[in-house]
Image (tube, grey):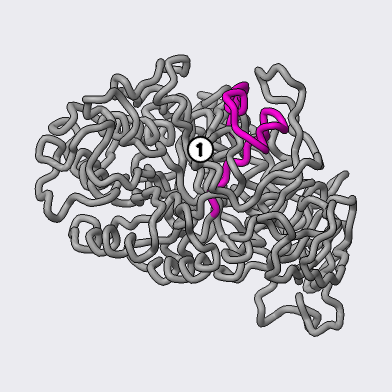
Amino acid sequence: HFCTMSRFRDGALSVEAPPSERSPIEEPPNQTLHCCLGAAVVIVLGGLGVYASSNVEPVARPAAPEAPPVVAPASTRAPSTFRTTSTSTTTTTTACGSFYFTGDVVQCPGTDTFCEGDQCCGAYTCPSASPHFVACRRGKQLDCSMSAYDGSSMPSMLEQPLKSISYGPLFVASEECMDAFSPKCGAGFVSDDVAAAWGQQIWGAPRHDLRNIAGIGANAVRTYGNDQRFSKEKFFNEALQNGLRVVTGLSNYFYTDPSSPGGGCANSGECHDVIAETFAQNLRYETGGFSQRRIYHKAIAAVNLMNEPDFIGISGERNYLRTLVSAFDGFLTAEKRAYITPWKDGRLPNITATWSFADSAANGLFVCSKEYHIRNPSTECGPGLTFMVQFYYVVQDPEGTVGYRPRNKIQQAYAERWVNAFNAFNPPKFLHDQFVQRYRRLPFFNDIFAFAGEWNPMHPGYNVSNLEDDIRQMDQYSELPLLGVSFFQYQVAYNKGGTERRFGLFELGATQIGSTSYILGDDKEAHAVHCLQPREAVSSIAAAWGGSRNFTGICPQTTATTTTVTAATTTETPTTAADTTTKVVVSSSRAAGGDEPATVAGTDVHF
């Protein structure tokens, strides 16, 4: 008998993973269907001695997917390999749908031949040898599938420390908001989930924000907002294509807004059910794109459960800790219900919450005390650290500390997947002395690492010329226990006022280069996507992180300036005006009468 544990789910037969392959939090299914295929039924006809046998009709199963082309090992590749000596500075690319692949050597399926660039092996193209893609497969139309759910993974934060950009580039409510803030600038947004498909012309073509983030030298992007109505698969694919990992997260909307499902669960501190249902929608491939066939999208590095939990909940209550631990538990329940299994290397995305860098006050309370689960204030309290220590003790004894009884093995998930995070706007040395050194002294954090979910040292009066050195210094501190930083932020937040407008690597210009698609529930059909105007900090970060400084969607120059500009144009298989690459070197001279470096006509600019 050939038997496999299976069960019916959503009207279809699905095969369960054997116990050795299940997630640590996954319980065995309580109902199983044993499908025994090819069993011979022997019928003995009494007296006649006649035997008849028949095979049981097997349960229909989907055909096994056709094997993708195999990337040739370096030692066996054909002599003509990617980036061989050439006088040309351009790279051949093969267009396949909306994706563009850099040419590399790929072994053709079932053959001993190799091809590269835009060559083909029979009906196959060989677009890329990147481990994050599979080549186009045979069919009526070429299917340039990204192997995003094949079980392989991108480097972990431990293997490759974060050099991330915090990313939440909302469109402007009106063009007047680019000049000055007013209450209408923050009104009328039915969703802040820019990673949804309606924002594709922002992070994809024609503006290509994710390509720009890679051009800065980043290896990751941190997102904000998560509207469970919209899939993020295309965003994850675009990030993957640009070599970026994603620190995604849940929206604080579910915790704080009375109109949200659960009515703003942070007020009660009971968030298990609402987060379990909300994240379940993210995990469904059809609605969220976070996973497919029980496997996470490989671009997802971590999931942030909450941004600054210490500012959430009713003032005077300790429910920010109960809120977070119940949300953590609900997150694990969603994974368990979706039968999520680890990647091939045994890992799952990290889980985190980004605390503020406050010293001891949450919602106006003094919380560095035994009443708030601090056992040794002299060693366990400090900027950001206080809350991390509190939550550690709550996870170890949730019922005894905050009266919460978990449904899942939260201690195990914490030990295996949790990474601490904080938002800080301080110089590197201050972070090192006040956080890193103290963190290292706590033995229970020996295997629990941390990263800066937001970091920007540019206080009022800051000299931007120091930024490159500060970033290099932070990179030096990106060793255990600190796993890197996410620089805050990509674009100026025009929906906010005050000091918020000091932050942003790019401003928006007046030129419209695209538009969003319709956002469900909006009273407008679309919103303008504007061109970008880089601020001086862009060059500093790119210099520190070794970025290519090739940027797309840059505003055309409209006025003459005294800035010395040397331009050399290189075209890389342009398909539209928005894909034309113009490389420009801008001197350190400033544009007359302005604060921003000059740019030249063209949509892609090199600084």
**Is 247 on the left or on the right of 53, as rendered?**
left
Residue located at (18% from left, 37% from top)? 366
Residue located at (62% from left, 21% from top)? 188
Q: Position of residue 223 (x, y in %)?
A: 54, 43
Above or below residue 422? Residue 11 is above
User: Is 160 in the magenta?
Assistant: no
Boundaries of the magenta span: 165-193
Residue located at (27% from left, 64% from top)? 433
Residue located at (59% from left, 60% from top)? 537
Q: Is residue 41 visible?
A: no
Q: Position of residue 460 (x, y in %)?
A: 47, 52
Residue 593 in which image quadrant: bottom right
Q: Position of residue 466 (x, y in %)?
A: 50, 68
Q: Position of residue 375 (x, y in %)?
A: 10, 46
| Type of the residue with mark 1 | Gly
Foreground residue, 182 or 328? 182
Foreground residue, 27 or 170? 170
**Is 224 on the left or on the right of 307, as rendered?**
right
Q: Which residue is mark 1?
A: 498
Q: Residue furthest front?
A: 593
